[in-house]
Amino acid sequence: MTPPSIEKLAEIMARLRTPVSGCPWDLEQDFSTIVPYTIEEAYEVADAIERDDMAALKDELGDLLLQVVFHSRMAQEAGLFDLQDVIDGISSKMIRRHPHVFAEESAATPEAVVTNWEAIKAAERQDKASDASALADIAHALPALLRAQKLQKRASRTGFDWHNVEDAIAKLEEEVQELREAASPDDKAEEAGDLLFAAVNVCRLAGVDAESALKAANGKFERRFRAMEAIAGKEFETLDLDAKEALWQQVKAAERR
């Protein structure tokens, strides 16, 4: 039996999905139409944590939980699985992947826990005859930058990796040159993708999380650009590039002070 609060939410969703007397919008949805909302809610959870807004986090976690219940209800209607199956599955997985807590194995440090976790996941992948690759189960729906990091980390565990960050930087410089030499739009797109992938490799080998680094860079650019707009006022868009660059340097210098 699910906990009362979860059960209540499941009952609400069942009512919303009841033909004729339910909600027309909820009834119209399927897995593919709900996916964008699921992804959006996960990002809103992350945003609340980044802002250290615990009231918002409580609300966003509720919204994310609703997505789990929504998908589970649609699966139940299709005779695939239900919410209890989802709960049982994740419970079993957490016990299986924490043998240092629920069994006799030991893991005295967070690093040891991660090592054990990855070994167990690798064994689970081997048990799936459909795809035993070291790159299996890396979600295609992940943001491209984050997926690149995961692909590279998985490949690294097999020994397929650069020896050091300097080798990765050399590869990055090579990709820059190949982009310069690309002629057709298709070639440029391919080389640009290779360049971004190589940049993620550099970040990873430098011990930098590429997703977090780019997020910080986005924030810095937005902050400085808004400061430029504030200084120039309504005249900003009419300024030439040299004037805008001068403003950029002014804002940058002010930040350093």
Image (cartoon, rainbow, N blue to C red):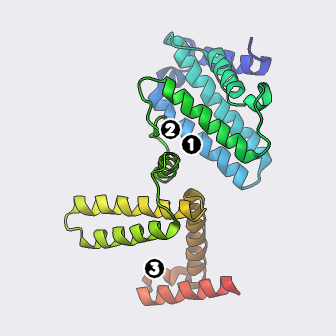
| Mark 2–mark 1 CB contact (< 8 Å) | yes
Q: Secondary structure at mark 1?
A: helix
How far, Cα to Cα, is label 1 from label 3?
Answer: 32 Å
Mark toward the viewer: 3 or 2:
2
Q: Position of residue 215 (x, y in %)?
A: 58, 61
Residue sitting nearer the eye, 165 or 224: 165
Q: Which picture quadrant has residue 55?
A: top right
Residue, disc 1: 40
Residue sitting nearer the eye, 153 or 194: 153
Residue, disc 2: 36
Tell me the quadrant of the picture where the C terminus can be found: bottom right
Which amino acid type is shown beneath numbered disc 1?
Glu
How far, Cα to Cα, is label 2 from label 1?
Answer: 6 Å
Mark toward the viewer: 1 or 3:
1
Q: Is residue 240 visible?
A: no
How far, Cα to Cα, is label 3 from label 2?
Answer: 34 Å
Tell me the quadrant of the picture where the N terminus can be found: top right
> Could you tell which of marks 1 and 3 lies nearer the N-terminus?
1
Which amino acid type is shown beneath numbered disc 2?
Pro
Identify the residue at image location x=63%, y=87%: 253
Identify the residue at image location x=79%, y=47%: 54
> Could you tell which of marks 3 and 2 lies nearer the N-terminus?
2
Q: Which picture quadrant has residue 140?
A: top left
Q: Secondary structure at mark 3?
A: helix
Q: Position of residue 158 (x, y in %)?
A: 49, 45
**Label 2, residues with CA under 10 Å away: few <14, some 14-19, many ≥20:** few
Task: From this view, report whether residue 75 is shown above or below residue 45.
Answer: above
Q: In the rendered view, does 168 fall on the left or right side of 15? A: left
Q: Which mark is residue 237?
A: 3
Q: Secondary structure at mark 2?
A: helix
